[in-house]
């Protein structure tokens, strides 16, 4: 099958066609996927129609699976999906649309803030793979922003200022921004705040990115208000339209993004009328397809 790469925006993002990850997860195909990610940072593979096992198999070649807490549930509620799958749907454990008062709605709301997955966890989080199982007839596009391009365009003065700074990231900070409250002690204890550098060098490409996310509350070691203002200023720069695009989903799409150099956000759809069943896997550490092949 011949493959075709079509850019999704002038700066980054591409559609990769002619790859069937259900049938072919060979080292050569996975290397093509990762090379395309190195260049474009976000890739959409249409028509994959992966089931859970297939999505996990693809993901495991790109790194170590992280486990989802699928938080926001009341203590008695079961998860809809197994622990390696992040449930990005508006559905409850019986696959029905979440009740209006269901606490899990808070989590989907805060996905609409620009963020990086798991920046609030101390791990080398790399790719997220989001698979569209059921999509609403309109809305629910996902926005992406290129943090490499943003870094490149910063003034030398700002580059110097941020070179050695760290920000505190907490999932509870971003949840609270969206009206989340009454977090339980067990939830708070499961995900304490961490600090992350403001500048990250990509381990594969050597390119620098600015690390921002709605989870970042303030600059470590600075008076809180000053750090907050500085982060707001950096976010305003980073989220200019020229650095972003929105992806319109079709059922069967698999979109992979590199959390080390992008931000993303969800957007509105009529989530009381329509189902949106999206399942995410997220990996950390180096990819494994090459070493797996060598060991065979
Ligand atoms: C995610 C996420 C946004 C969306 O899957 O991590 O933020 O559009 N998704 O569903
Ligand atoms: Mn996300």
Image (cartoon, grey):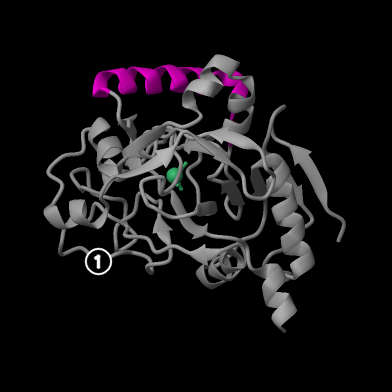
Region in magenta: 223-247
Instruction: From the top left corner, tell me how far across and down residue 252 is, in percent.
Output: 60, 55
| Residue 132 appears left or right of 37 | left
User: Does the magenta run of residues contain 142?
Assistant: no
Question: Residue 67 appears at what percent x and percent y?
Answer: 39, 64
Q: Which residue is mark 1?
A: 78
Q: Quadrant of residue 177?
A: top left
x, y (%) of residue 219? 34, 29
Residue at 31% x, 51% y is 97
Residue 195 visible somewhere in the drawing: yes
In the foreground, 268 or 287: 287
Depth check: give the residue in front, 198 or 241.
198
Q: Is residue 237 left or right of residue 6?
A: left
Residue drawn at x 46%, y 33% as measured from the top left: 198
Query: SS of the residue at dot 1?
Result: loop
Q: Is residue 150 above or below residue 18?
A: above
Residue 9 in the image, given as x and y percentages of width and height = 69, 30
Quadrant into which the N terminus falls: bottom right
Check if residue 229 falls in the magenta segment.
yes
Q: Residue furthest bottom?
A: 296
């Amino acid at each position: 099958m011949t493959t075709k790469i079509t850019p999704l925006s002038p700066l980054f993002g591409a559609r990769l066609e002619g790859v069937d990850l259900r049938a072919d997860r060979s080292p050569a195909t996975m290397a093509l996927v990762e090379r395309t990610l190195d260049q474009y940072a976000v890739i959409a593979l249409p028509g994959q129609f992966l089931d859970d096992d297939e999505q996990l198999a693809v993901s495991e070649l790109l790194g170590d699976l992280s486990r989802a807490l699928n938080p926001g549930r009341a203590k008695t509620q079961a998860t809809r999906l197994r622990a390696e799958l992040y449930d990005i749907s508006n559905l409850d454990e019986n696959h029905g649309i979440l009740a209006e008062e269901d606490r899990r709605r808070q989590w989907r709301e805060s996905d609409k803030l620009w963020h990086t997955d798991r920046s609030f966890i101390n791990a080398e989080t790399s790719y997220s793979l989001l698979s569209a199982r059921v999509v609403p007839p309109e809305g629910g596009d996902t926005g992406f922003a290129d943090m490499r391009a943003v870094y490149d365009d910063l003034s030398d003065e700002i580059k110097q200022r941020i070179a050695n700074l760290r920000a505190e990231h907490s999932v509870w900070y971003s949840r609270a921004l969206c009206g989340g409250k009454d977090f339980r002690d067990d939830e708070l204890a499961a995900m304490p705040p961490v600090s992350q550098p403001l500048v990250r060098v990509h381990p594969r490409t050597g390119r620098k990115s600015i690390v921002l996310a709605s989870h970042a509350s303030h600059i470590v070691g600075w008076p809180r208000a000053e750090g907050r203002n500085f982060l707001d200023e950096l976010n305003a720069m980073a989220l200019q339209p020229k650095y972003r695009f929105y992806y319109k989903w079709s059922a069967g799409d698999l979109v992979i993004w590199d959390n080390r150099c992008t931000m993303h956000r969800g957007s509105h759809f009529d989530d009381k009328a329509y189902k949106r069943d999206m399942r995410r896997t997220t990996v950390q550490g180096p990819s494994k397809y090459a070493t797996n092949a060598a060991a065979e």
